[in-house]
Amino acid sequence: MAENIYDVLMERGFIEQCTHPEEVRELLGKEKVTFYIGFDATADSLTAGHFLTIMAMMHMQRAGHRPIALLGGGTTMVGDPSGKSDMRKIMTKETIQHNAECFKNQLSRFIDFDNDNAILANNADWLLDLNYVDFLREVGAHFSVNRMLTAECYKQRMEKGLTFFEFNYMIMQSYDFLKLNQMYGCQMELGGNDQWSNIIGGVELIRRKENKPAYGLTFKLLTTSEGIKMGKTMKGAVWLDPEKTSPYEFYQYWRNIEDVKVEECLGLLTFLPMDEVRRLGALEGAEINHAKEVLAYEITKIVHGEEEAKKAQEAARALFANGGKTDDMPTTTYAKADLDEGKDILTLLVETKLAPTRSEARRLVQQGGVTVNDVKVTDVYQKFTTSDMDADGALVLRKGKKAYHKVKAD
């Protein structure tokens, strides 16, 4: 008998909350279940934050269940207030449609949509042409405002002011679940733990209107030990699109995570057996770096393919081995005339994004944390020109021990 996927997700550290744990476990063990996860199309690429929910979808599909990836062409027009201190900026229909297409292409790399093995839906299909009065009568009547105001996603916004516009979001997401239940027999909604209130709304709406069972399950959110959402760098989000975050930068992000997070990420973001996850997670001292290499390689392999993962790993190792001489290093190319004139070190650090601001760049130099071609920079006003380039025609900037960037002239 194959292992119950509920137990697999629990052991790997995914499950945070579940509406009916015993019923859900029994259901997943005995029949093929159609479930859905929503993706609001707020950018033109999915992020490392989405990757955890994509992994859960992959586990569920491998166990024989049917995923629905719901693109939020309609809900993105409003924006989810969950976990947000300000209202989301309003996006045009065209931008949202473009983003949804990008999501569709990316999800197809992870989920098998052939032969009805999974469904790709877009809530624009039913939300954008709704009759407002009919919707209030059919759906709004089932929601208690008093109860909605106790939801965590709204509580955070009450102090700053919650618009009626955003207050509708929970009802729209609940209606999505009802529509998917009616159209495809969808019985479960899955999502990050910040979606708990919205998911419960949908579960209760189906149970009231359809008199049918419906279930919700949430996953833990990936955070640093300080509780900040993982998947953010000084440059911004870590994207799954290789044009926005290169496979090398993606690999390096996971290679450099905190020691205390290694075992958790191996469980959630790779398919390694749990015995191996625990063995790697138990490594200490310098050996934990081996576990981080495995983690970074495995995640990069799933997202970008084995060849790119190997290239990223070799590039990262080469940086440590030979002071940063590698072709796969992040590179900025300037016009030769610009570099003939010279660029000061603070400008180089900011423009290569090794430092977010000039003041931070200044601090790095003053603390002795910056080298150019293996020579420590001590003068914050030092300029570099094409005459300072190495034999390969490059300036190799290094911040600390791990962050490298190559500057070339065109």
Image: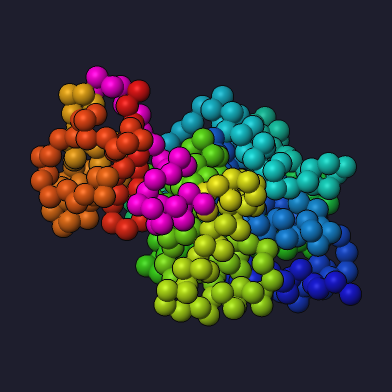
404 to the left or right of 185? left
79 to the left or right of 204? left
Q: Position of residue 279 (x, y in %)?
A: 59, 78
Residue in the image at 89% along x and 75% along y: 1
Task: Establish if 110 lies above or below 20.
Answer: above
Q: Position of residue 209 (x, y in %)?
A: 76, 54
Which quadrant of the view contains residue 372? Answer: top left
Q: Looking at the rendering, in which quadrant would you find the C terminus? A: top left
Residue in the image at 70% along x and 55% along y: 57
**Residue 91 in sight in this render:** yes
**Residue 261 in sight in this render:** no
Q: How many marks?
A: 0
Q: Position of residue 13 (x, y in %)?
A: 61, 71
Q: Nearer the viewer, residue 207 or 238?
A: 238
Task: Establish if 42 lies above or below 95.
Answer: below
Residue in the image at 85% along x and 44% along y: 116
* Residue 333 is inside the magenta segment: yes
Q: Position of residue 139 (x, y in %)?
A: 68, 47
Farthest-out residue, top: 337
Magenta stretch? 314-338
Q: Nearer the viewer, residue 60 or 395?
A: 395
